[in-house]
Amino acid sequence: MQKAIKRFIPTSWKPEARKLYYALFKPFVSILKRGFHFIPDKIELLTGKRSRLTPPKWMLFVGAGDFKAIGEKLLGHFIEIAGLKPGDRVLDVGCGIGRMAVPLTGYLKNGGSYEGIDIVTDGIRWCKKNITPLYPNFRFQLANVYNEAYNPKGKYKASEYRFLYKDESFDFIFLTSVFTHMLRPEIENYLSEICRVLKKGGRCLITMFLLNETSLKLIELKQSSFYFRYNFKGDRVNDKENPCDAVAYDEKYTRKLYNKNNLEILEPIYYGSWCGRKETLCYQDYIFSVKKIS
């Protein structure tokens, strides 16, 4: 329906129309969603079908799929592939409403800790209220970063934001579905900040949409979920009017950027199914890396 409406809006009006949508229509939809799910959510909570550490359905904004199952699957990847240890100090950039924090509460111990940052106030507020009181080693902070859809009153540009942590504070840092919505100056700044706060020898996982010979061929064959038809200031985007909806990066550029920031990619890159690949580990492309010691 949203796509159909966009066809009738003149191009010059679309930026203002999008702002109006986020300011007025989206909050209205949220109220309707809450009303629709309110009674079923309460019943699930009272009958034990939903635990206190699972957000109500009307609050979810982290994408499709089963909240609990996806979190547990990703945790398995962190442990088996990235070597996450129970005593690690972990940073989750783009923690949302706790999809990864919840399964990590049962794994991080013996000095292990978790810090989550996100730009969505409701998600951070829910995590502080429901997770931190039970697990004091899990802390959450709002990143005051501007985003047209999720934080229109944000103070800082993502391309200028400095993480609120000291140098070399973390053993493991991960970002899921974050760089897939950010433009080049923004990921360059974030990757620099990741290197700054990651300990030497520390590990990092970032999910992306990578463009290489295989993914470009599958896009050409129309096998892909996204086509990234448009160039936008050096990036490839799926929607030129809303570029941060989905962003893809050339793999060669990405490898150079990692090397520039003293991060060594741990081969192989785990390519995802987003472009039509078969028998993959994941949907988006997984890049595991380690901060070089020297």
Image: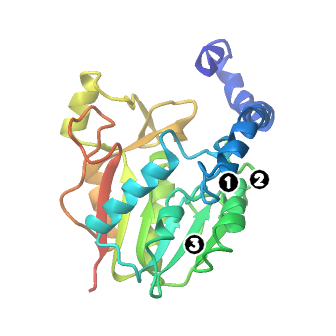
Residue 12 in the image: x percent, y percent?
A: 68, 23
- CB-based contact (under 8 Å), mark 3 and mark 2: no
4 and 249: which one is in front?
Answer: 4
Residue 203 in the image: x percent, y percent?
A: 34, 73
Amino acid marked by disc 3: Phe
Residue at position x 47%, y 40% in the image: 65
Residue furthest out toward the front: 47
Residue 79 in the image: x percent, y percent?
A: 32, 68
Residue wearing tag 2: 153
Instruction: Find residue 163 and name its label.
Output: 3
- Placement of the N terminus among the 4 image quadrants: top right
Instruction: Find residue 293 and name its label.
Output: none
Instruction: Find residue 146 and name its label.
Output: 1
Residue 156 in the image: x percent, y percent?
A: 67, 61
Q: In the rendered structure, which disc, 3 or 2, sits on the residue that comes first in sequence?
A: 2
> Is 70 situated left or right of 265 in this image?
right
Q: How many marks on residues?
A: 3
Quadrant assignment, res 293: bottom left
Residue at position x 62%, y 45% in the image: 60
Amino acid marked by disc 2: Lys
- CB-based contact (under 8 Å), mark 1 and mark 2: yes
Distance from the alpha carbon under mark 3 to that under mark 1: 14 Å
Q: In the rendered structure, which disc, 3 or 1, sits on the residue that comes first in sequence?
A: 1
Amino acid marked by disc 1: Tyr
123 and 55: which one is in front?
Answer: 55
Up-down: is 287 above or below 41?
A: below
217 and 30: which one is in front?
Answer: 30
